[in-house]
């Protein structure tokens, strides 16, 4: 089954290469769900049916996979997905206050999307940034040591500056604090949509 | 001999330790070249066995022994577990971001030793940047002839695929990870069969943690015996600890095991923030029972921590000072496990949810005296006898992990829990 005709030519080609990259077709279901999410804005029913056709699974099988993972969003997501960690280390250092600050600045409750579809807000479990607690992500790009006031400034900056792509280094420099470790090389890649900015077929240019 | 193995390059090249150029100029890929030219695969495996390195993902099982279980049926697969999700743990993130070639060389050496034609690196979904760095290193290695067909003219060929997860702690459990990689829900499998016999696509598979594999270039270059000589006999080698919580200097620290917890928390970590008092700490990730100040002189080794009723687990140390509401802290950890339960096993699916609800009730002043015994009773249904190491009524250890914080507060802070429960007369009716 070939990729859907209304997908971008790049994504059609990537889908075909992804399927070929695994010993079994079914293994491509996770990366294909990310591509489908980019095409549709979220993992819609139609997106799951397309992935099913591509992998030889039933729509129900793809749905069972998609609904297992928290990062396959089943509803529209705002331009900027704000994920605030409230697991143990961030909790000990004020992660709940960061979440409250983000909710109030964006006027968006935890788990919801703002009326203007600019922000989606969610609390998340541990994102592996405990040494830089409290931490949050914007479209899965990380900012560490974000105190509530800085988190509010970050939200305003996203609205006013409309960064595209969202770069972790830039956010860290403007709004971050304590880090888990020195980040090392400057990053030139970031997220353009609320889907993790990773192409398993390779497009990485940072650090070259 | 340097006390630092994994992070030496990061210190030497703070701006670009992740590049092939830096990796090579500091001796990188020489172990691979030498092994492919001069060593039989069995000889590489023998060095890893001789190193006595114990898996760094959490279970601390000897890696060389695990490799020895690999069944002969072909093909063999190698899967690197980079699904680092245990709350408090952020060490693999640093290894992925700052020295991905060390991991890639480790993958190539392990694949050669194990006869693996195709290896996978499963990176958690919330780590796009670490995944990009590893992907880039893999591309560089392909371009340099260090991966792909006929590596360095040796006749050995290896493909490496980086796979991104999508947000599920349970996929760090190795059989759940394999199900996820196959395109299924990330639900753990009943063992046996173990992955070494029936793993990815039902083929013999070795699953190793990022830190474990990242040590292999050094082990092969310097010999297993040299690695085994570092630190205490049963906790050989250095270890990358993630220190967080109420400490002055949180961060990742690569240390030789064997120092006391007092040294680790007060000297390495700089002590408690604002010079406050230590209340307790988690010695090995959210799944581990908590340690109390009277255990500060216990050595930081795998066996000493296990012998004192907890585990070194993933090397994640979370420190709590005397301002900590331990019921709130325990609730937050139990909430994590309730959220991450895959739902296959009733005791875990229902039990973790009940435990979270009871702790929330107590936290919000609506607790009842009977909740104290009920917390222990529900815990007992997940992990019979509340023993350590835990028994389980579940397929995987996630359920018993949720019991650890309950046991910890009910053993060490029962008075604080009781004080949060209104007396019968005050309790709201209904």
Image: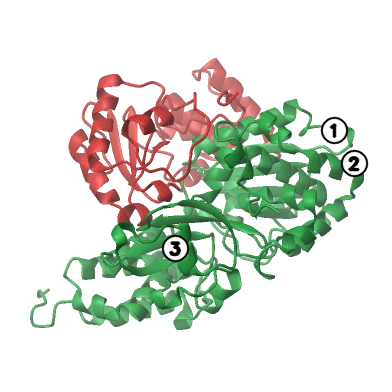
Chain colours: A red, B green
- Give the labeled residue for mark 3: B265
Structural crowding at the residue carrying mark 2, measured as other residues with C-alpha within 10 Å and reported as few (<14), some (14–19) or many (≥20): few
Q: Does the image show residue B360?
A: yes
Instruction: Quarter of the image for the C terminus of chain B: give it.
Output: bottom left
Nearer the observer, disc 3 or disc 1?
3
Vertical relation: A55 (above or below) B249: above
Residue at 39% in and 21% down: A164
Structural crowding at the residue carrying mark 3, measured as other residues with C-alpha within 10 Å and reported as few (<14), some (14–19) or many (≥20): many
Mark 1 and mark 2 lie on one chain; the one further toward the N terminus is 2
Parent chain of label 1? B
Closest to the observer: B51 or B71?
A: B51
- Give the labeled residue for mark 2: B37
Nearer the observer, disc 3 or disc 2?
3
Could you tell me which secondary element the residue under label 1 belongs to?
Answer: helix
Taking the image as shown, residue B367 lies to the left or right of residue B95, namely: left
Structural crowding at the residue carrying mark 1, measured as other residues with C-alpha within 10 Å and reported as few (<14), some (14–19) or many (≥20): some
Please state the horizontal and vertical placement of residue B244, each as a whole percent of the image: 41, 55
Closest to the observer: B177 or A88?
A: A88
Please state the horizontal and vertical placement of residue A143, each as a whole percent of the image: 38, 37
Residue at 50% in and 27% down: A186
Residue at 89% in and 48% down: B39
Q: Does the image show residue B150?
A: no
- Give the labeled residue for mark 1: B152
Same chain for labels 3 and 2? Say yes or no: yes
């Amino acid at each position: 089954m070939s990729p859907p005709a209304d997908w971008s030519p790049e994504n059609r080609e990537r889908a075909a290469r992804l399927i070929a990259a695994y010993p079994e077709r079914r293994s491509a279901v996770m990366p294909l769900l990310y591509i489908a999410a980019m095409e549709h804005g979220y993992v819609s029913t139609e997106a799951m049916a397309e992935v099913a056709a591509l992998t030889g699974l039933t729509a129900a099988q793809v749905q069972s996979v998609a609904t297992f993972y928290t990062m396959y969003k089943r509803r529209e997501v705002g331009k900027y997905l704000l994920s605030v960690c409230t697991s143990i280390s961030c909790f000990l250092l004020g992660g709940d206050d960061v979440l409250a600050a983000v909710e109030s600045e964006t006027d968006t409750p935890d788990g919801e999307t703002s009326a203007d579809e600019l922000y989606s807000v969610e609390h998340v479990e541990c994102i592996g940034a405990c040494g830089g607690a409290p931490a949050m992500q914007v479209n899965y790009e990380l900012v560490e040591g974000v105190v509530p006031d800085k988190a509010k400034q970050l939200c305003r900056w996203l609205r006013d500056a409309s960064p595209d792509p969202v770069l972790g280094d830039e956010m860290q420099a403007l709004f971050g604090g304590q880090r888990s470790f020195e980040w090392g090389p400057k990053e030139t890649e970031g997220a353009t949509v609320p889907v993790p900015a990773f192409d398993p077929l390779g497009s990485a240019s940072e650090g070259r | 001999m340097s006390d630092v193995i994994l992070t030496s390059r990061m210190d030497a090249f703070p701006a670009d330790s992740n590049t092939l150029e830096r990796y090579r100029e500091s001796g990188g890929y020489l172990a691979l070249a030498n092994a492919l030219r001069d060593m039989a695969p069995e000889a590489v495996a023998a060095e890893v066995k001789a190193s006595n390195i114990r898996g760094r993902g959490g279970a601390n099982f000897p890696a060389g022994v695990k490799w020895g279980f690999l069944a002969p049926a072909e093909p063999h697969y190698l899967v690197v577990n980079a699904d680092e999700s245990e709350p408090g743990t952020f060490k693999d993130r640093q290894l992925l971001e700052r020295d991905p070639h060390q991991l890639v060389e480790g993958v190539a050496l392990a694949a050669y030793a194990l006869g693996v034609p195709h290896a996978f690196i499963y990176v958690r979904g919330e780590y796009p940047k670490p995944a990009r760095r590893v992907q880039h290193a893999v591309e560089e290695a392909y371009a340099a002839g260090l991966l792909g067909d006929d590596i360095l003219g040796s006749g050995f060929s290896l493909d490496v695929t980086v796979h991104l997860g999508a947000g599920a702690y349970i996929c760090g459990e190795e059989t759940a990870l394999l199900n996820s990689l196959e395109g299924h829900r990330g639900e753990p499998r009943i063992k046996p069969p173990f992955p070494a016999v029936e793993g990815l696509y039902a083929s013999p598979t070795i699953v190793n943690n990022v830190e474990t594999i990242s040590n292999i270039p050094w082990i092969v270059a310097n010999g297993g015996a040299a690695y085994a000589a570092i630190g205490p006999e049963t906790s050989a080698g250095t270890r990358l600890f993630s220190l967080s919580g109420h400490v002055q200097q949180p961060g990742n620290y690569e240390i030789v095991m064997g120092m006391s917890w007092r040294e680790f928390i007060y000297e390495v970590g700089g002590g408690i923030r604002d010079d406050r008092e230590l209340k307790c700490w988690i010695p090995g990730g959210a799944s581990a029972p908590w340690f109390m100040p009277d255990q500060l002189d216990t050595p930081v080794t795998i066996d000493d921590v296990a012998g004192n009723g907890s585990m070194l687990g993933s090397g994640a140390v979370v420190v709590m000072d005397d301002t900590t509401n331990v019921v709130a802290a325990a609730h937050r950890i139990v909430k994590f496990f309730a959220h991450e339960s895959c739902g296959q096993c009733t005791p875990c699916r229902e039990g973790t949810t009940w435990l979270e609800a009871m702790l929330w009730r107590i936290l919000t002043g609506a607790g009842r005296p009977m909740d104290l015994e009920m917390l222990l009773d529900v815990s007992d249904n997940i992990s019979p006898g509340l023993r350590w190491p835990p028994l389980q009524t579940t397929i995987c250890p996630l359920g018993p992990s949720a019991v650890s914080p309950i046991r910890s507060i009910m053993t060490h802070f029962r008075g604080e829990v009781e004080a949060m429960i209104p007396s019968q007369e005050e309790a709201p009716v209904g």
